Image (cartoon, rainbow, N blue to C red):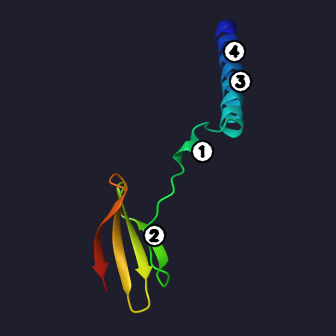
């Protein structure tokens, strides 16, 4: 009976140390390649055009709502191809 209590005590201490170590790694370690993920993308908008909203459709496509002087246009942007594949006019 005493052996079981000692083993369980050692397991509790080991899991507490693992928990503290995991919290430390989560808080203080930042990913080193985060700055490499920032990309500048130009949509070549005219002077009077502006982006109203960007919505995620799925993991590969975005819906970009663009407003010009007359109407609102939605552009489907393909992330893998890095281009607008089609426009939807309202």
Q: Around disc 3, counting alpha carbons within 10 Å, would you say few (fewer than 14), some (14 to 19), or many (20 or more)?
A: few
Q: Hey, which residue is sitting farthest bottom in the picture? A: 70
Residue 70: image x %, image y %? 39, 92
| Marks 2 and 4, how far apart at CA | 52 Å
Residue 25: image x %, image y %? 67, 32
Front disc: 1 or 4: 1
Q: Around disc 4, counting alpha carbons within 10 Å, would you say few (fewer than 14), some (14 to 19), or many (20 or more)?
A: few
Q: Which residue is painted at 45% across and 70% down in the image?
A: 54
For the residue pair 26 and 30, the one nearer the viewer reads as 30
For the residue pair 9 and 60, the one nearer the viewer reads as 60
User: Which residue position holds label 4?
Assistant: 10
Between disc 1 and disc 3, whose residue precedes?
3
Label 1 close to label 2 by CB (< 8 Å): no
User: Which residue position holds label 2?
Assistant: 54
Front disc: 1 or 2: 1
User: Which residue position holds label 3?
Assistant: 17
Examine the image and state in which quarter residue 27 appears: top right
């Amino acid at each position: 009976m005493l052996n079981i209590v000692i083993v369980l005590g050692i397991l509790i201490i080991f899991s507490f140390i693992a928990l503290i170590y995991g919290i430390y790694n989560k808080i203080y370690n930042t990913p080193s390649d985060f700055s490499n993920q920032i990309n500048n993308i130009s949509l070549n908008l005219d002077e009077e055009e502006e982006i109203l909203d960007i919505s995620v459709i799925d993991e590969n496509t975005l819906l970009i709502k663009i407003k010009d002087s007359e109407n609102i246009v939605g552009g489907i942007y393909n992330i893998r191809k890095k281009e607008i594949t089609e426009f939807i006019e309202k």
